[in-house]
Amino acid sequence: MTQQPFVSTEIATQPDLWRQVSDGFAQYGGALPQAGQRVAAVGCGTSWFMAMAYAALREDLGQGETDAFAGSEFPAGRSYDVVVVISRSGTTTEVLDLIRATDVPTVAITATPDSPIVELADQTIMLDFADEQSVVQTRFATTTLALLRASLGEDLSKAAADAQTALTVDVDDLAKLEQVTYVGTRWTVGLAHEAALKQREAASAWTEAYPAMDYRHGPIAIAQPGRGVWVFGEPPAGLLDDVKATGATIVHHADLDPMASLVVAQRVAVAKSLALGLNPDQPRSLSRSVILG
């Protein structure tokens, strides 16, 4: 009997973890930015995409000007009230260098208690219960975003219930698609990028991600039968019709919270990886953290 990959077990814990950070928000909330503060959110890879989602959502909810950056691209001279740094391992070179270099107060969200980021950041939020054995991130990233959404006043009960539903969605046909392009609007653009990354990491698959309105400015040219377009959130007017005309498969979980649709995408990535005989826990060329000499 083939052993279930760690990542599959970790994916399945997400509904409970989202409830945990939402219900227990009071123990974390004091460290997170307050309404009206000017904020930068920073991470690398998956953590950057969660930062992108948080930044757009925070602005859309009227909480204050918020920018998102990859760790290596943070503009050192720009003024902020606080920098939120997301790093599962707490050892990623770019984010540690950023914290050392900035005079802005920093809040780190991590899953690793003994990591350097705990000592360097001004405040730390420890989500060690959401850590993962798999190199591929799933539950730490979404639990972090659930916490950040709760900090903005969002009720995560529906999102958690939808994530439970997402664990039952049949993904076999989706895993057979030759290529998938993921699109979103505003805060779900980050989710689109993250969904694409999951397939690239776990299954070495050709995936792309774009803001939904920009998708028709060129990328739609690759849409065809046997390929898919996965829409996060509300699609722009006319987009689904334009995709339908190409013959591509439309994936749009209109009744699910967008983070729950990401859970489905995580499961598709694992299913595709296993179908190809790959190891979704330990993708080629990847490690838990990028530490530069």
Image (cartoon, grey):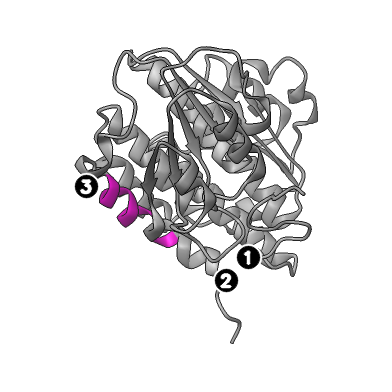
Q: Is residue 51 above or below residue 134?
A: above
Mark 3 residue element: loop
The stretch drawn in magenta includes residue 233 = no
Say left or right for 182 vs 157: right
Magenta part of the chain: 12-21
Residue nearest the observer in this picture, 9 or 140? 140
Q: Residues within 10 Å of mark 2 (few under 14, many from 20)?
A: some
Residue nearest the observer in this picture, 274 or 132? 132
Q: Residue 241: image x %, image y %?
A: 60, 21
Residue 5 badge: 2
Pointer 2 and pointer 1: residues touching (CB < 8 Å)?
yes
**Residue at figure coordinates x 30%, y 56% from the top left:** 16
Say left or right for 291 vs 163: right
Query: Residue at label 3?
Result: 24
The type of residue carrying mark 2 is Pro
**Residue at figure coordinates x 44%, y 28% from the top left:** 54
Residue 281 badge: 1
